[in-house]
Amino acid sequence: MKYLRSTAHPFLFLPLILLLLFTGCKEEEAITPLNTDKELLSFKLESARNLQLKDGDIVGEISGTVIALEIPEDVDISSLIATFTHSGVKVLVGSKEQVSGTTPNNFNSSLSYRVVAEDESVQEYRVVVTLTPVIVPEVIAIPCIRVETEDRKPIVEKETYLKATVVIEANGWGDDYEGTTQIRGRGNSTWGMPKKPYRLKLDKKSIILGLAEERDWVLLANYIDPTLMLNAVAFKIGQLLELPFTNHAIPVDLYLNGEYQGNYLLTEQVELSSTRVNIDKKEGILLEIDTNFDEDFQFKSTHYKLPVMVKDPDIKSDEHFQRVKDEFHQLEAAIASDQFPNTPYKEYLDVESLAKYFIVYNLTHNMEINHPKSIYIHKDKGSKYTMGPIWDFDWAYDYEGKGAHFGSHVRLFLTNKNFPPPALGYTFFSRFFGDPAFVALYKETWRRFHAEKKTELMEYVDWYAKQITESQKKDQEKWQNGTTNYGYKIRQLKSWLEGRFAFIDTETNALK
């Protein structure tokens, strides 16, 4: 085939080319800007002011003169309160003046917010609501523990065990379990609360929900904890820091003599054992420093008058007890010395464990270290004292002295304030910040933890919350302790932790 050559003159196409160029290069039509003296600057529906918003705040997207809102379809929108900012002198809906965060409106009807300028001119913003489908979350089953006491006797004290049977439905958290046990109450202040904590002593060592084989187990009630996970989060911090012998946390539903008791945290009993505090059972020592002072073998330390108790092992003789006291006083004397920090105290104490221990207590703002209460320290045969295991975080997270969690995130965890003087724990533990070498270790340990582990900690909070969401609803129905918006409490916890991370950054940068 032959191709024919065109003989048309090129100028014949000029009008077409100019038309195409004009069309392609034409600028988009400019949007007339809004008057800045009557502009709506922000618009949202806050869950704190709209209790029907169980999943948090809804932020309106302002585009031109349209406010777009996406609201779950199961939310009652007949009376919602908007929080807004604007550049005018007032805002109206119809003829009614609106007060941000106060005035309710029916969002089922056609709704416009009108911003009035000083010259009484008006800019109107139309509300467009899109109802979004509600996705039903996957129901996650946590383990269920059913305990039945002999003759269904009630558990009314902490000293005497009752015989019982225990059945555990693992629900994928390990293997199911059936056995015989003994059960009693436990705790100090927590025992006086409506929802009781318990201790189990199985008749034989057993693996429970994947945790190492043992007889003694603890069920923490977390009654004052609005998230039901504050102890679990503290344990996670300890694990991320690789603090020796940190406990595990497994959420469970507890039934006692057929009656639902609520959401509990199953964890290990703090004790000397090859699967717990794994040190020599005869020559090793586990001490608890606690003002409750309720163990059989106890003493007040020489220099700081600390209430020291022997938790494990059983003391066999006066000589054994004296050796325990002498070893602790050797450490304490090196810390109390006028020559501190130029003393051999680091020969007696693992300061790396102390730095990690302080980080757990600081990040969770656990002020019980100041009393002191529930402070564990252990020492293996021929070794140094090591801090831990960590324990008892019910009154942490800014609760102590306030009676509510997640308030200020800028309070010091070591303080002599708000305690009957002297605060024995503060006097002892604050001493270490007089050692520049320890301060440097503490700062570097914090820096690494923040950089390498913060994300994992926050992910754990979300993961744990997801596991217990359904259990928390049942717990709230049982105890009616005020946590009706669980998602809001989890956001509070995460926001408070974020603030605490920032505060400790500033605090450690100022340390010398």
Image: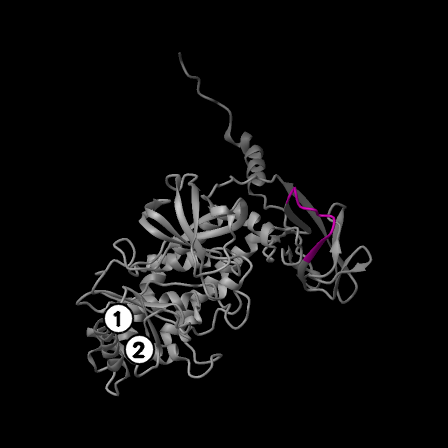
Q: Position of residue 485 (x, y in %)?
A: 59, 53
In this rendering, the answer to whether 115 lies above or below 507 is: above
**Does label 1 or label 2 sit earlier along the sequence?**
1
Residue 219 in sight here: no
SS state under label 1: helix
Residue farthest to the right? 95
Q: Is residue 185 magenta?
A: no
Seen from the viewer's position, the closer of residues 15 and 439 is 439
- Look at mark 2 in the image and give the residue it sits on: 432
- Look at mark 1 in the image and give the residue it sits on: 351
* Image quarter (top left, top right, bottom left or bottom right) of the C terminus: bottom left
Colouring style:
one colour
Q: Is residue 80 magenta?
A: yes
**Residue drawn at 56 percent across, 36 percent down:** 20
Q: Position of residue 502 (x, y in %)?
A: 43, 67
Q: Is residue 437 found left or right of 93 in the rendered image?
A: left
Residue farthest to the bottom? 338
SS state under label 2: helix
Seen from the viewer's position, the closer of residues 111 and 313 is 313
Give the amino acid type for the residue marked by disc 1 in the picture. Val
**Residue drawn at 68 percent across, 45 percent down:** 129
Give the amino acid type for the residue marked by disc 2 in the picture. Phe
- First to last magenta residue range: 72-82
Labels 1 and 2 touching (C-beta < 8 A): yes
The disc label shown at residue 108, or none:
none
